Image (cartoon, rainbow, N blue to C red):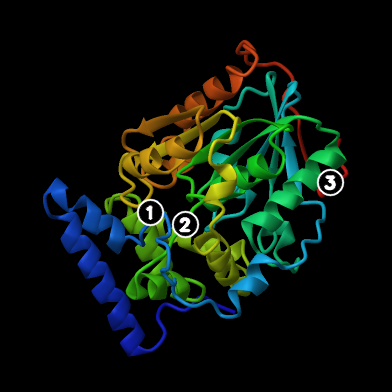
C-alpha cells in the first residue's frame, strides 16, 4: 500500500498543530528544554509510578508476555576481525541504515553482523511480537548460529533498546554495548497528541517527515528528508512498523539493566532534542556503572547519515578499549557476506 500523505483533514490539522507546538517551544530560550522533551514525546523520562501510558491496540500483557520464537535474522557479515559485533537498526530503517559507515569500518579488528529485525528488510514478512525482548532473543540466536560465544552489540534508536535487552538477558556473553541515540530502557510514555503523531507514522508520510525533521534540528535538506521517508516505507511492513512503536515505547525493563556490569557507550546527537545528552545522563549513565557518553556536534538522531566518520571513530574506539585491539591498516581483509544465517 502506498504511503499516505495525510489521513482525514482533521488528522492533518492535529498533526500540524502538534508540530507548530513543538517548533514554538524550540524557538524559546534554553530553559524551555523540559517542555521540549515533553512535546517531543517524553523520551528519557522514567515511567512514573501509577501512570497509564496511551493505550495499546491490544492488552499490554499480550505484548510483554508473548511467547518468543527465535529465528535467524537476515544479516550481512562485514569484516573478518576477532571482535564480533551485532549491529541493530532503528525504527525508520532496515540494515541499510548502516550503509553510510560500512566502507570506513575497521574490518581487520572487527566483524559486524548487520541485521534486519522482524518486519524490516528481508525479514519484513516475518511475524512476531515486535518487542525489544523478542529482538534480543533473535540476536542471541544469531550469535549462537555464528558461533560467537562473546560479542558486542551496537544499536540505533530502538536498536539501542535491543542492545540493552541483550545485555540484561546475557551479561556474561556481551563484551560491550553502544547505543546511538538509544531509546531508554524505561520506555517512552507520551502525551496523547504526541502518541497520535507517532502512531499515525505507520501510514502517513507527513508524520514520518515531521518526526525526522524534528529530531535532526529542523534544518536538513528537503531531498534528504524525502529520501529518509521513502526508504522507511520501502524497507518495512506497515503493520509491523506500527506494532514496533508499542514494542519500544511501552516496554519498561529499566530495573533489569540498572547496575549492569556491561560497559556501555551512549552516543547522542547535539541536534536531537528528544534523546539528548542530558536525557542520556538521566537514563543511560544512571543505569550503567561503566557507562560513557559522547555527544556529536552537528548530528541529530541519525548520526550514521549526519556524522558518519565521527560516529565510526567514537564507536570503534570504545569497542577497541575492551581488549586494547590496535587499529588495523586499510587494505586488509574486509569481506562482506550477505546471508540469512548461513554465513559463518
Q: Quadrant of the C terminus?
A: top right
Q: Is residue 271 left or right of residue 173?
A: left
Residue to which mark 1 is pinned: 45
* On screen, residue 283 above or below 223: above
Determine which of the numbered discs, if any, sits on residue 341 in the image. 3
Q: Is residue 18 left or right of residue 237?
A: left
Element under disc 2: helix
Classify mark 1: residues with Cα within 10 Å, few (<14), some (14-19) or many (20+): some
Along the polypeptide, which appears first: circle 1 or circle 3? 1
Q: Quadrant of the N terminus?
A: bottom right
Determine which of the numbered discs, if any, sits on residue 228 in the image. 2
Element under disc 3: loop
* On screen, residue 178 above or below 183: above
Give coordinates of residue 39: x percent, y percent: 28, 63
Mark-to-mark CA distance, 1 and 3: 37 Å
Give coordinates of residue 297: x percent, y percent: 32, 33
Q: Judge whether residue 75 can be spotted in this image.
A: yes
Amino acid at each position: 500500500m502506498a504511503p499516505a500523505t495525510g489521513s482525514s483533514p482533521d488528522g492533518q490539522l492535529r498533526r500540524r498543530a502538534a508540530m507548530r507546538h513543538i517548533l514554538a517551544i524550540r524557538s524559546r530560550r534554553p530553559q524551555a528544554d523540559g517542555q521540549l522533551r515533553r512535546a517531543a514525546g517524553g523520551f528519557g523520562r522514567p515511567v512514573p509510578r501509577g501512570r497509564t501510558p496511551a493505550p495499546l491496540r491490544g492488552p499490554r500483557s499480550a505484548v510483554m508476555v508473548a511467547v518468543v520464537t527465535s529465528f535467524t535474522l537476515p544479516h550481512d557479515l562485514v569484516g573478518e576481525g576477532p571482535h564480533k559485533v551485532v549491529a541493530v537498526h532503528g525504527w525508520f530503517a532496515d540494515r541499510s541504515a548502516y550503509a553510510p559507515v560500512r566502507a570506513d569500518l575497521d574490518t581487520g579488528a572487527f566483524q559486524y553482523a548487520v541485521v534486519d529485525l522482524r518486519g524490516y528488510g528481508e525479514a519484513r514478512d516475518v511475524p512476531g511480537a515486535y518487542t525489544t525482548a523478542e529482538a534480543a532473543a533473535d540476536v542471541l540466536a544469531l550469535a549462537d548460529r555464528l558461533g560467537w560465544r562473546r560479542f558486542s552489540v551496537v544499536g540505533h534508536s530502538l536498536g539501542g533498546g535491543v542492545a540493552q535487552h541483550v545485555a540484561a538477558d546475557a551479561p556474561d556473553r556481551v563484551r560491550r554495548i553502544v547505543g546511538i541515540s538509544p531509546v531508554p530502557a524505561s520506555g517512552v510514555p507520551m502525551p496523547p497528541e504526541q502518541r497520535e503523531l507517532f502512531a499515525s507514522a505507520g501510514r502517513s508520510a507527513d508524520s514520518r517527515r515531521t518526526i525526522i525533521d524534528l529530531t535532526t534540528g529542523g534544518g536538513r535538506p528537503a531531498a534528504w528528508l524525502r529520501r529518509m521517508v521513502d526508504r522507511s516505507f520501502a524497507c518495512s511492513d506497515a503493520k509491523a512498523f506500527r506494532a514496533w512503536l508499542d514494542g519500544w515505547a511501552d516496554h519498561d525493563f529499566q530495573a533489569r539493566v540498572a547496575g549492569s556490569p556491561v560497559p556501555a557507550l551512549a552516543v547522542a546527537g547535539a541536534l536531537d532534542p528528544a534523546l539528548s545528552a542530558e536525557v542520556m545522563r538521566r537514563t543511560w549513565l544512571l543505569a550503567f556503572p561503566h557507562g560513557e557518553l559522547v555527544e556529536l556536534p552537528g548530528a541529530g538522531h541519525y548520526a550514521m547519515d549526519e556524522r558518519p566518520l565521527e560516529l565510526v571513530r567514537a564507536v570503534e574506539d570504545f569497542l577497541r578499549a575492551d581488549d586494547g585491539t590496535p587499529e588495523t591498516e586499510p587494505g586488509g581483509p574486509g569481506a562482506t557476506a550477505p546471508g540469512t544465517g548461513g554465513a559463518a
